[in-house]
Amino acid sequence: LIDATHKDVDVLLLLSNSAYYVAYYDDEIDKVNQYQRLSLEALEKIEIGPEPTLFGKPKFSCMRLHYKYKDTSGYFHTLRAVVRNPDEDGKDTLQCIAEMLRITKQAMGLDVPIIEKKLER
């Protein structure tokens, strides 16, 4: 995955039974230089849609993970899949990741909506 707001930043998304980790990876030094652990309980919704752009047609699909921090909504990570083929936009990959997050949260007795829409800036 790639941080959609910083195109040159690689992101690793790790999933455990109760949390997911957003890790920022620097391939020049082959090291994770920053990560954030987020409880699956705090994950409020997942949005998948065209990347937010001011001008032109979006080239990629993005996934936005909305979460609560200290019981306050409004926080999110916007990520896009690395694509190998120029004809792909990464949407299939993002849908699979979103479904894995949903299944893992459902195993905790909770659910998370997956919404397909145009993402706002």
Image: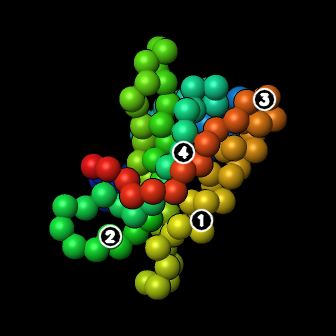
Would you call the spot at circle 1 few (<14 residues within 10 Å), some (14-19), or many (20 or more)? some
- Residue 10 x, y percent position in the rendering: 43, 55
- Read off the residue under disc 1: 93
- Residue 93 x, y percent position in the rendering: 59, 65
Q: Quadrant of residue 57?
A: bottom left
Colouring scheme applied when the structure was drawn = rainbow
- Read off the residue under disc 2: 58
Would you call the spot at circle 4 few (<14 residues within 10 Å), some (14-19), or many (20 or more)? many
Would you call the spot at circle 2 few (<14 residues within 10 Å), some (14-19), or many (20 or more)? some
- Residue 103 x, y percent position in the rendering: 75, 44
Question: In the image, what residue type sits under mark 1?
Answer: Thr
Judging from the image, what secondary structure is the residue with disc 2 in? Answer: loop
Q: CA distance from mark 1 to mark 3?
A: 23 Å
Question: In the image, what residue type sits under mark 2?
Answer: Pro
Q: Is 22 rendered above or below residue 94?
A: above
- Read off the residue under disc 3: 108
Q: Which label sits in the foreground, 1 or 2?
A: 2
Would you call the spot at circle 3 few (<14 residues within 10 Å), some (14-19), or many (20 or more)? few
Instruction: Return the residue nearer the eye: 79 or 105.
Output: 105
Sequence-wise first label, 1 or 3: 1
Sequence-wise first label, 4 or 3: 4
Q: Residue at x 79, y 29 (%)?
A: 109
Instruction: Return the residue nearer the eye: 94 or 112.
Output: 112
Q: Is 102 rendered above or below residue 79?
A: above
